Image: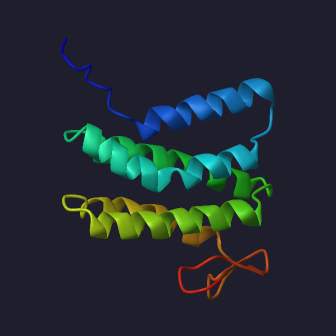
Amino acid sequence: MEPRQSQPTNYGHFVIHVVKRMTQQSSTIDQAMLRRAIGLASSYLVTDTSTNSERGIQTWCTGFHRLVDIMVALHSRGELELETVNEASKACSECWSVAGTWRGMEDCRQGVKEVAAKLKKLLDEPHRRTYKGSKVYTPNSS
């Protein structure tokens, strides 16, 4: 009996599934569920790239960007929660570390930079270290 080959993971498809489920249950975005999906970014970075060497970086990047695009929309509606911003900041930090630690994932850092740039635009000016007056998670702070 031959071993069964597992299917590659796809963060982009996972995100679509989560958002579809969220919006079928309610007309609003459940930010607790959104935070859980964002919190899985570093895990999907590892699994997408290791189970799909040809498209894994792309599927992971697509998923992460979609989640941040939802955050941008929530921000423009005045609904984005600080906890969601903090979770996204943590996810960027974790993904940056993973991408720099695992061989062959260096290109993923560009995706992290792009996501982080979108997030930074949401933060308060001029220093962009707070969101609506509250300090945002950074890797060197608690």
Say above or below: 110 vs 12.
below
Q: Position of residue 28 (x, y in %)?
A: 80, 38
Q: Is residue 61 visible?
A: no
Residue drawn at (80%, 32%) of the image: 27
Say above or below: 33 vs 101.
above
Q: Position of residue 88 (x, y in %)?
A: 58, 62
Residue drawn at (38%, 70%) of the image: 97
Q: Quadrant of the N terminus?
A: top left
Q: Is residue 25 left or right of residue 92?
A: right
What kind of colouring is applied to the model shown? rainbow
Q: Is residue 94 left or right of residue 22?
A: left
Residue drawn at (36%, 64%) of the image: 98
Residue drawn at (54%, 32%) of the image: 16
Q: Quadrant of the C terminus?
A: bottom right
Quarter assignment of residue 133: bottom right
- The residue most toward the front is 1
Say above or below: 5 vs 27.
above
Q: Is residue 91 visible?
A: yes
Number of dots carrying numbers: 0
Q: Position of residue 115 (x, y in %)?
A: 47, 61
User: Nearest the camera: 110 or 77?
Assistant: 110
Q: Is residue 20 left or right of residue 23?
A: left
- The residue most toward the top is 1
